[in-house]
Amino acid sequence: MTDYYLKPNIKMEPLIWGWYAWPHLIPPMTAACNVVERHLKIMQSYVQIPQVHAEAVKNPKLLGGPFIDLDGQNTDEIKELIEKTKRDCGKLIILNDAIKEFDRILKTEAQGDTLEEFYSRVPKPLKGYIELVYDLNNNPSIRLIEPLIYNSYYSTEHQTIALSEITNDFRKFVLSTPRLEHESEVYLNVPFSDSELDKLFRMKEEPKSLKEVIGIFDVPISKQKLFESFFTEAPPLAPSDRKYQGDGVRIRYFGHACVLVQTKSVSILFDPAISYPILENQVPRYTLADLPDYIDYVVITHNHQDHLMFETLLQLRYKIGHIVFPANRKGALEDPSIKLILKHTGFPSLIELEEMGTISLEEGEIMGLPFLGEHSDLNIQSKLSYCIQLKGRKFLFAADSNNLEPMLYDHVFNIIGPIDMLFLGMECDGAPLTWLYGPLLSHPINRIHDKNRALSGSNFDKAWAIVEKSMSNKVYIYAMGQEPWLNYVMALKYLDDSIQILESNKLIEACRQKGIESERLFGQKEWILS
């Protein structure tokens, strides 16, 4: 019997309730808020004024806004999805309402006296799942007991994997447009944690019986012919240099914040967000086929949709040794546990790292470093930059850090010393707080405050201060979201006069004037340090 490979250009999208699955749709608390305050509101607006949405998505200035990209022609389908969402997410809708209602009560009425009396007023959906606390300035808040909430509210029932063939980089922005079923896609109704998915994605490298795979996923007869077209008898054209055999360190840039660091004995992959092979490829790129057979460590810098991507991670799960990620601020709605997110999506070997925590390697170590900014001044602790030491070399990956307090880097570099290569994000004019965190708010925020508390990284002055202290002679700007295959999660389109481009150009020029090798990374790049 002939065995088959899964074609390399088969796109996999993880969906939940008909929306693209990103990290805040896994924890029941943040999922509840996003279902009510993002999904339902956007869909209800579309049903009322579909042509406004259709016109808005054509305006580059409104890119990434709360507008459904469906040409105003799918109101009946969106109405059906609204009703389905209300049925399927009933418990979560009630949970959102309870969190918001009780948070408002607590903020209004708790004035510094004991909080004990408030426990009797906790809404039933929250009873036994929260602790009521003050900070040292008598500001009251709810501490969520996350594991218990998962146990009662988390469900995999509406998780789906959508498979289709991808031919170009364009994809609709996923935070504002739901995914309606399409005839060109096959839908696998399996939880993200299902180990059978590992068998499927392993088929991009190892062949398997097609009949067996159809049986595993119970593909309906009407979709079997399409499903079969996703496979081929031809072995993949895997690059011969996927595994680095040299005596030094090889670094490959895969786009955005995704970087692969390899020696002969270890491979470390940062923030996997990797392109599929595109036949009409206008931008050179590495793809999933360029990764080694085994990845010792996948390292996550922070819990945003362009850094913790299930679409890539689920396809790599079978070849990942460990996932390293920052510890969160326990019990805060805005800072859900990455550990629980990954545990419930099927990743077995998880390493939660604190600031200045280390992981020993055969030829060096991974150290987690604090970084400030890019989280709208919210008390979010699940964010780390990383210093990698290998074969006597040091590499610093500071994806979205905003150098708000220069003394931080005095302390950091006093500990880690000079750096050989610095990778630094400069997305210095980010989206407002509500773009990502708005659904979590119990009270509306002042529009000026919303805009000023942006999801921003360092500008030239802040970035240059890091460069000088790092004493690095190689400085690269990355994590800018410029690659075309990332626009569906980033919604960014820079022009030559965009402030992010102008500020990063200034850094590149300042570096070169000092004899420092520097560029803004785009597409792909490789370095080999002997």
Image (spheres, rainbow, N blue to C red):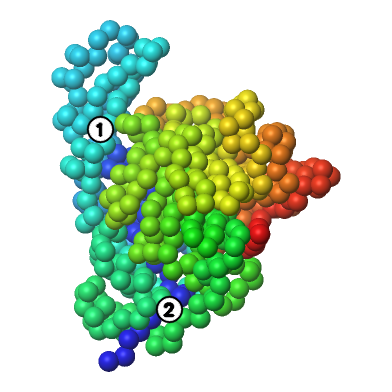
Residue 389: x %, y % from top left: 56, 47
Whether residue 476 is visible to the viewer of this picture, yes or no, is: yes
Q: Residues within 10 Å of mark 2 (few under 14, many from 20)?
A: many
Q: Against 143, is 219 above or below?
A: below
Residue 158 left/right relative to 262: left
List the residue tagged with mark 1. 145
Q: Against 4, is 395 above or below?
A: above
Q: Amino acid at mark 1?
A: Ile
Q: Earlier in the sequence, mark 1 or mark 2?
A: 2
Measure the C-alpha gap from mark 1 to mark 2: 43 Å
Write the residue at 41% across / 39% down: 353
* Secondary structure under the numbered disc 1 in the rendered image: loop
Residue 300 left/right relative to 407: left
Write the residue at 24% across / 80% down: 212
Seen as rendered, the residue at the extreme bottom is: 1
Q: Amino acid at mark 2?
A: Lys
Residue 508: x %, y % from top left: 76, 47
